[in-house]
Amino acid sequence: MGRCGDELLSRIEHFADRCVAVAEELDRLGRSQRIVDQLIGSGTSVGANMFEADEGMSRKDFCRSVAISIKELNETRFWLRLIARRDWIPGARLDQLAAEVDELKRILGAILSRSRANNPRKTKSGPLAI
């Protein structure tokens, strides 16, 4: 195990699985392949980047991967909202997944903020000379 913890990584894997399930349902319904691909891409990228962050070689590497995961969560949120607006899948069926996006964004945002704030190489006046 690296920096993220098994519980968080498992939660993110489950999130990716749920995004893929929604995309597969859209595909079965004959909806836009572009949207299917985008949802699969952004929903699974959250997990791929967090697994990369978990084994990050440096604090900067870790923070970069977490930040990308947050961006991918934002993109996933957009696709879920579009799917609901188009009524391709009823919004009520997407509510829990959308709530998970928001919770994961808060969790990852807190992790990123703490990681950046705890950077021992910076002071209020800027980077320390080494």
Image (cartoon, rainbow, N blue to C red):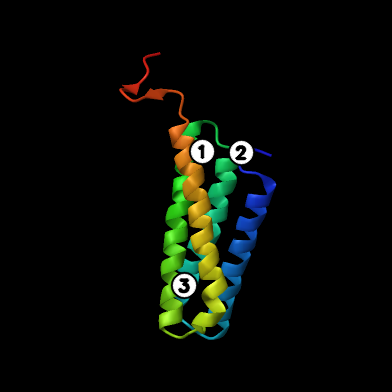
How far across and how far down the image is residue 30, in percent?
51, 85
Q: Residue at x 45, y 41 (%)?
A: 113
Q: Gap in Å between the C-alphas at discs 2 and 3? A: 29 Å
Amino acid carrying label 3: it is Leu
Considering only vertical position in the picture, is 102 above or below 65? below
How far across and how far down the image is residue 90, in percent?
51, 84
Quadrant of res 15: bottom right
Q: Is any part of residue 23 visible from this angle?
A: no
Q: Gap in Å between the C-alphas at discs 2 and 1? A: 9 Å
Residue 3, numbered label: 2
- C-beta proximity under 8 Å, tags 2 and 3: no
How far across and how far down the image is residue 88, in percent?
48, 84
Residue 62, numbered label: 1
Q: Is any part of residue 22 visible from this angle?
A: yes
* Element type where label 1 sits in the image: helix
66 relative to 125 in the view: left or right: right
Q: Residue at x 61, y 73 (%)?
A: 21
Considering only vertical position in the picture, is 77 above or below 51? below
Q: Earlier in the sequence, mark 2 or mark 3?
A: 2
Amino acid carrying label 1: it is Phe
Q: Which residue is mark 3?
A: 80
Amino acid carrying label 2: it is Arg
Q: Residue at x 47, y 59 (%)?
A: 73
How far across and how far down the image is residue 10, in percent?
67, 54
* Element type where label 3 sits in the image: helix
Q: Gap in Å between the C-alphas at discs 3 and 1? A: 27 Å
* Quadrant location, the C terminus: top left
Q: Residue furthest top?
A: 130
* Quadrant location, the N terminus: top right
